[in-house]
Amino acid sequence: MTSERIEHRACFGGWQDVYRHESKVLGCDMTVGVYYPPQAEQGPCPVLYWLSGLTCTEQNFITKAGAQRYAAEHGIILVAPDTSPRGDDVADADSYDLGKGAGFYLNATEQPWATHYRMYDYITEELPAWVEADPAASDVRAISGHSMGGHGALTIALKNPGRYRSVSAFSPIVAPAQVPWGEKAFAAYLGQDRAAWQRYDATALVAMAAEKLPLLVDQGGADEFLESQLKPHLLQAACEAAGHPLQLRMQPGYDHSYYFIASFIGDHIAHHAAAMRG
């Protein structure tokens, strides 16, 4: 896989890089932010994959979350990919919640989306293979994300037992098959068969999870999408019914923005660091 480094900035004793690489899975070039902590010069470091939300690129997390400080403290590589395939020949829609910037971390089966929108395979297979080809990165992994990316982190961890040491999410879309964002995307990408939607719905997946990987979820109490799109109580009910460990932390006063993420990202990175050391 061909790649080139397009950004290289000193940051908390390490380096915040951005790469452009060829994705055969998606059929386009992709950009991805990679933070190397200072410990990466001494040997392989564990990797935390961050999945961003609707409308985001790799830039939102690396410029707004303040995560590099904590990654440097714990010796963790941060990998933040773009949220969808890009390019002139990639299908798009005239809305922020479908098409480019809205890949939903699934493998589309319907045209025109199926040709390029295979973000699930990209995140679970192609991206880690590219990352772990670097001697600085180990194959010890964790995954996290925000909103649409929180949905991606939870579903990918639940569908891949043993692949990740830990998982967490900020303001995740926990039940996309039951809310407008998910219904619109799933109908377009996966078709009208709602049974197919369940394969990418965290509330459905906890019931059949082969591994009881604890879920850490932070949700802002003043989030403007809390009641209409996020509905964390549905995940809580599903986890209780399945006996699946969940730490749901409602944070009063916080909204859906990166101010919220920056306030608690240190907790999440410490959570992942402890799991990846184990």
Image: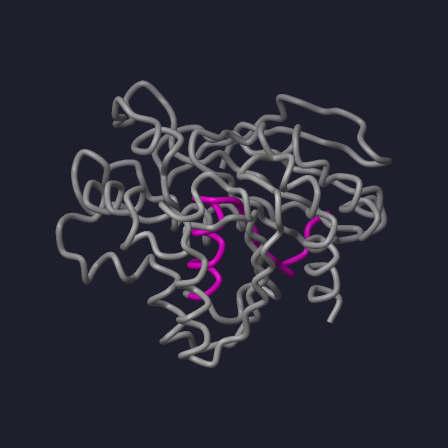
If the image is split into quadrants, where does the C terminus sit? bottom right
Q: Nearer the viewer, residue 3 or 101?
A: 101
What colouring method underlies this structural image? one colour
Q: Nearer the viewer, residue 241 or 202?
A: 241
Q: Quadrant of residue 233?
A: bottom left
Residue extending furthest toward the top: 88
The residue at 40%/79% (across/down) is: 241
Indicate yes or no whether the magenta region holds residue 139: yes
Residue 54's spot in the image, x, y percent?
Answer: 43, 35
151 shown above or below 89 = below
Residue 174's spot in the image, x, y percent?
Answer: 41, 56
Q: Is residue 10 left or right of residue 120?
A: right
The residue at 53%/37% (across/down) is: 81
Q: Nearer the viewer, residue 144 or 4?
A: 144
Residue 10's spot in the image, x, y percent?
Answer: 80, 27
The residue at 70%/38% (across/down) is: 35
Q: Which residues are magenta?
A: 135-158
Q: Is residue 104 left or right of residue 177?
A: right
The residue at 66%/45% (across/down) is: 134
Indicate yes or no whether the magenta region holds residue 242: no
